[in-house]
Image (spheres, rainbow, N blue to C red):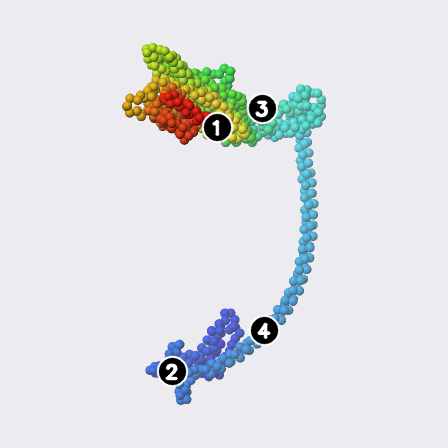
Amino acid sequence: MKESIKSDSKVSKSPSVGSLPLILDIDDFKGEFSFDALFGNLVNELLPSFQEEEADSAEGHGNIVGSDMLANGHVRAPFDAATLTQGLSPLFPEVDALLSLFRDSCRELIDLRKQIDGKLSNLRKDVTAQDSKHRKTLAELEKGVDGLFDSFARLDSRISSVGQTAAKIGDHLQSADAQRETASQTIELVKYLMEFNGSPGDLMELSPLFSDDSRVAEAASIAQKLRSFAEEDMGRQGISVPSVMGNATASRGLEVAVANLQDYCNELENRLLARFDAASQRRELSTMAECAKILSQFNRGTSAMQHYVATRPMFIDVEIMNADTRLVLGDQVSQASPSDVARGLSSLYKEITDTVRKEAATIMAVFPSSNDVMSILVQRVLEQRVTAILDKLLAKPSLVNLPPMAEGGLLLYLRMLAVAYEKTQELARDLRAVGCGDLDVEGLTESLFSSHKDEYPEHEQASLRQLYQAKVEELHAESQQLSESTGTIGRSKGASVASSHQQISVTVVTEFVHWNEEAISRCTLFSSQPTNLAANVQAVFTCLLDQVGQYLTEGLERARDSLTEAAALRERFVLGTIVTRRVATAAASAAEAAAAAGESSFRSFMVSVQRCGSSVAIVQQYFANSISRLLLPVDGAHAASCEEMATAMSSAEAAAYKGLQQCIETVMAEVERLLSAEQKTIDYRSPDDGIAPDHRSTNACTRVVAYLSHVLEAAFTALEGLNKQAFLTELGNRFHKGLLNHWQKFTFNPSGGLRLKRDITEYGEFVRSFNAPSIDEKFELLGIVANVFIVAPESLSALFEGTPSIRKEAQRFIQLREDYKSAKLASKLSSLWTSSS
């Protein structure tokens, strides 16, 4: 901002207003305007003198008491009117000067505002005039631009039309040039064609082009063109090429040219193949590539590709083929094992893959169509080299005359087939990775095994049957050897020994399952389709079911045979009513031996049943873990196999049921023998000799319970679940019935009734271990029925009225009372029996 107040000399402390002319400029209000700065510049010359006077006044009155300090640091004396009257100087002596200054400034500001208003009015008028002029100019420009756009549109349309015309002209020129070039080439081709259409077989008068080795590619191209043209012309005339080849002088058309061109092409192709072979032996890849490129004009280079592949050492070197056989089969072919063959095939196929990989590098550098050459090479490898070793390795056996097990049987063939198939599949994947063009190498590999896979299911089933038959013969031979080494110790003992050596073995069944697992793994390997896989798996699993079912059934039948022999041994020593003491003693000894044989047979059968259950569980677990998931993709296959499994095991179940019935017969026969031998008449009819009655169990009861506890340990261990429950329930019923029949032979007095009740209690406590509620209930009723021997005759009616459920059994037991006739119980209780009936 410019100085707003000018003075020639320094302003005095009491300047006059007229000595300070005020000048304001419009520029002072431009830019960043500050009112404080403007005001300060106006009063800056007046206020400093005022401040100095204030400072002097403050020093003179410093001791005045009660003076006030101004906010700006000056001391202000208290206002006193008397002071004014005494003529003292005012507090702001410059007020008049400032007031005059402010008034002048106000007038200046008003003048400036008028000037500004005038300027603004003039500017507003100028802007309005310029705006009107500008609008008029813009309107004129818009009209000009519209006209310009129209001109450009017409120009663009014209340019487009000219461009299209030029393009058409260019196309015509290009077509004309192509026709001219074609005509020129046709003239050349016709000239060459006429040379070939001279004398049949005369190739000596041809142009130097066809004999110049440096222009072989050009000669081959022209020869192929001429040949195609001639054959096409003859085709239009209805003349076949073979007839022309047989009689080139039949007409004066192009027949001679076709024959001569064919001869020339053959000669040229042979010459190029010879050069290709020579370059191949020298490993001159550039020359080979040049020849291959030229040969590609002949039958798309097929002859060169096939010739190259056919001349590879691995296809023509006999020593390589013999080395393949030694590597896979060893020196002695008949003794090769699947593991040795697997290692040999892995080594051979690795060598083949490495060889193909090396050939692939050469083929990529030489042949334009390298994929086609790789297809031919890989196909030749599989069809010749691999097939040769597979033919020696896999000799398909006859299903009529199976190979003997001493030589490995069918299983060896199947294992060899699986190893060869798996390793060849790996080779196919490796060759695919190396590169085999468009060849379906997986399909070709499958075709190598098609004849084997067609009859694979029959071979697999025949192998399982052969293995089973061999195992049965092995077990039979072992049994015979053990029987011969043991010797004949006695009929019963011999039967027991033979039975023990022919028992069911879980290990054998596990071996059956292992055979089947191996067969299923081969099914999975050879069967790619889910339907074929399910059918093969179902057939193989059916073989296992047949084997296990037959093995278990025969084992249970052998165990039943020992039970039958023991039963026959018991029947042999049944005594008549009148025998001597000596005969009775001998018979008792023989009966004990028969009982021992029966117990041994019982235990042996229970062991067989237990092993049979374990074997069935193994088969069921195998089915659940390995078979069912393979059958699920095919509707009905899983259900059919479950039904077959149930059918296969039904024969074993029937044999087990019959055997368990025989076990019950065996146990009950021994129980009856013990009761007959140990039960005395006085056990239940103690004499009244004044001696206290014996409340202990009878000796027969003790012996029977001890025997049952001992012999049934095998049943408790062998049986489980519903089978155990059914067996013990049936045995309990037979035991209950046997005791009833046994007690019908005796007469009871009250003391004997007490002892009978004690026996019933012992029997009831034992059968409680059967966990059969129906049997427990029967023995509890027996305990109640025994009371008919204890109560007085006059109390019997009350007993029956309290427990009406025992009337039927009690009617039989009352007749066994010692006082039945003397107490005339029949007549006394007749009314009771009539009412109950």
The secondary element bearing badge 2 is classed as loop
Q: Earlier in the sequence, mark 2 or mark 4?
A: 2
Disc 4, disc 1: CB below 8 Å?
no
Q: Residue at x 39, y 78 (%)?
A: 70
Q: Earlier in the sequence, mark 4 or mark 3?
A: 4
Q: CA distance from mark 4 to mark 3?
A: 109 Å
Q: Earlier in the sequence, mark 2 or mark 3?
A: 2
> Around disc 4, counting alpha carbons within 10 Å, would you say few (fewer than 14), some (14 to 19), or many (20 or more)?
few
Q: Nearer the viewer, residue 173 or 816?
A: 816
The residue labelled by disc 2 is 77
The secondary element bearing badge 4 is classed as helix
Where is residue 340 drawn, in percent x and y?
43, 22
The residue labelled by disc 4 is 119
The residue labelled by disc 1 is 627
Q: Nearer the viewer, mark 1 or mark 2?
A: 1
Q: Is residue 418 toward the left or the right of residue 718 in the image? A: right
Q: Nearer the viewer, residue 405 or 358?
A: 405
